[in-house]
Amino acid sequence: MKKLLGTIGYHPGVYRRYADKDVWELCLARQEDVVSFYRRVGFSIGRKQHKLRSMLLRKGLIDQKDD
């Protein structure tokens, strides 16, 4: 997934979520990358897309009309 996101211009960090489990997470740290991800890629899982949108609205990074 990191390589795939890299091909479209994102450079996420990869972190091990738990010391005792093989669970990893990708992290986009720059605000403009997060907003761009929301607008260009997004999540196919509705609850994740909704959470991302809510967070961006709360932080004032997108407008209510942004979809």
Image (cartoon, rainbow, N blue to C red):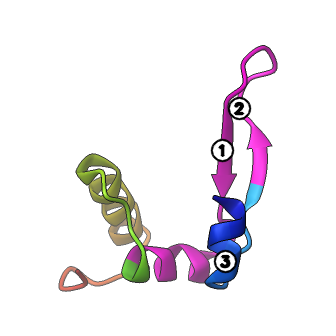
Relative to 63, is 52 on the left or the right? right
| Rendered location of residue 16, percent (x, y) | 77, 35
Residue ID for mark 2: 17
Marks 3 and 1, the one that precedes in the sequence: 3
Q: CA distance from mark 2 to mark 3?
A: 20 Å
Q: CA distance from mark 2 to mark 1?
A: 6 Å
Q: CA distance from mark 3 to mark 1?
A: 15 Å
Residue at the far left: name it: 65
Q: Which of the 4 image quadrants contains residue 41? A: bottom left
51 to 42, vertically: above or below: above
Which residues, given as a range, are shown in magenta? 14-38
- Other-residue count near label 1 (Cα within 10 Å), few / some / many at <14 / 14–19 / ≥20: few
Q: Is residue 6 magenta?
A: no
Residue ID for mark 3: 10
Going by the numbered disc 1, the residue's amino acid type is Glu
Going by the numbered disc 2, the residue's amino acid type is Arg
Relative to 18, is 65 on the left or the right? left
